[in-house]
Image (cartoon, rainbow, N blue to C red):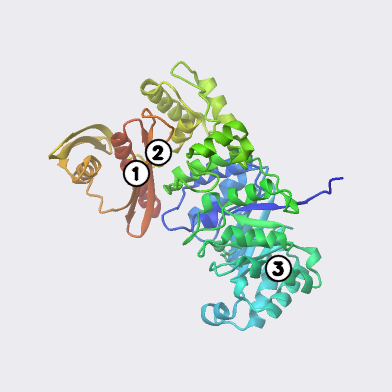
Amino acid sequence: MSTKKDKLVIFDTTLRDGEQSPGASMTKEEKVRIARMLERMRVDVIEAGFAIASPGDFEAVQAVAEAVTESRICSLARAVNADILRAGEALKKANASRIHTFIATSPIHMKYKLQMDPEDVLQQAVNAVKTARQFTDDVEFSLEDGSRSEPDFMYRIIEAVITAGAGTINIPDTVGYGEPEEYGAMFRRVIESVPNSDKAIFSTHCHNDLGLAVANSLSAVMNGVRQVECTINGLGERAGNASLEEIVMAVQTRQDLYPVETGIDTSHIVPTSRMVSSVTGFPVQPNKAIVGANAFAHESGIHQDGVLKHRETYEIMRAEDVGWGQNRLVLGKHSGRAAVRARYEELGINFSDSEEFHQVFLRFKELADKKHEIFDEDLHSLVAESEAPVERFQLNDLDVRSKIGSAPQAFISLSIDGKAHETEAKGDGPVDATFKAIEYIVDSGADLKLYSVNAVTQGTDSQGSVTVRLEKDGRLVNGVGADTDILIASAQAYMDALNLLASSESKKQGV
Ligand code: KIV
Ligand code: ZN
């Protein structure tokens, strides 16, 4: 007889804690696109941002709250009124909302960061939860640096915030200091010691400074936790957060062990991982569990032989269950608008208006002329291309020459506000020559912080997806470009980054 398992709530914070990773900032449109993928994956709660952090964050939370109906949408808020009001405002149109309010509870944070007495911290936490409950009946309270907090104080504050109306209690390992056995045991003691603990769901939120974020989260689950906070590809500040795909697949693969199940549709994991990687420009290492290119590649002859004879000899999961191998040949140069739009819908990508789809369709046609087989990954890369609201800079032509023994040379033609300019430059490589040529004309004053190229599909006809990260006056932007010619993709990505910088400059000036 099978016993019914508890539901493990998957709370994704890619768009909030993931975005806090330096250089991983996302535009509102990118956040909406990722949120739709998370919704399709049946993520329970999507933390869309920190509404008070900036007008951009506020608008992104608002846009995600409007676009997503199946998942609960959450905004972070410090335990202060202004933050909570802003979060409540941003979430107004959500079908299901949550306010996630937090305050630090460890002695070191209270003394040096907050400079507050524990009793005042407790009172502020209770007030914050009460205020948040005026906006939504779903309030989460986090004890920041909880894993380094004193047990008795934790029990008191948790009891008080549950009484005030918090339905989820999150005890983060903010600095990634926890160790699995110790972190799990902490939850068991908290749940046993807090008199009203049965009125709340306990949650884990782990950082990966010691490489233990997933192990700590799973240990917490074994000790009564029923919500895990995590991110796609383990994106997050410093060494990142616990990785969603690893937690979900550990729970699914070891159903003999874990007393919980998730509602996640795992077949969307790989496409979502790809999307997050291309939007942020953070490549996924080939040996990364679940979503790395080699995660299911058996190289040794003994393994290959075993897998061919009986798959389970060496495979504990099926690649197709997490979305590998679904890159079907779906479209070609004869495919029309309806077919392309329908495939995008199947991939969970909807366009906000017909002009947006028209632009993507034009890029699809261009690509189909160069590359006969169009895979789902190609479709993803086409939408990841330029989203900049301002298109000041446009690439007209590029001619790059490389010869053994001489410096590569790039000849470029581009337009700024419609006016054409041409120049040439030599560089330490063809990409360097191309970027120098662009800068001879534009003279942007921006610093190049990251350049990365990834093959979108397999084979030498693959598109190269390029990310260029530029920084100017403390602002970081990620430009993206994709083409079967990686030099053209690189130039496009650079132009995209310049357009994003121009967009954020015009926003700042209120244009
Ligand atoms: O790491 C942390 O403590 C956080 C909280 C705000 C939940 O991200
Ligand atoms: Zn965090």
- Tell me residue 17's x, y (percent): 53, 58
What residue does disc 2 label? 386
Of tags 2 and 3, which is closer to the observer?
3
- Marks 1 and 2 close (CB-CB < 8 Å): yes
User: In the image, is 172 to the left or to the right of 379?
Assistant: right
**Marks 3 and 1, how far apart at CA:** 48 Å
Using a 10 Å C-alpha cutoff, classify the residue at mark 2 as few (fewer than 14 neighbours), some (14 to 19) or many (20 or more). many
Of tags 1 and 2, which is closer to the observer?
2
- Marks 3 and 1 close (CB-CB < 8 Å): no
Name the image quarter holding residue 463: top left
User: In the image, is 411 to the left or to the right of 109?
Assistant: left
Residue 482 in view in this figure = yes
Above or below, 21 relative to 393: below
- Residue at horizontal 61 percent and vertical 37 percent from the top: 318
Above or below, 345 relative to 84: above
**Marks 2 and 3, how far apart at CA:** 45 Å
What residue does disc 3 label? 187
Q: What amino acid is at disc 2?
A: Ser
Reading the chain from its start, which is encountered first: label 3 or label 1? 3
Of tags 3 and 1, which is closer to the observer?
3
- Tell me residue 165's x, y (percent): 75, 65
What residue does disc 1 label? 499
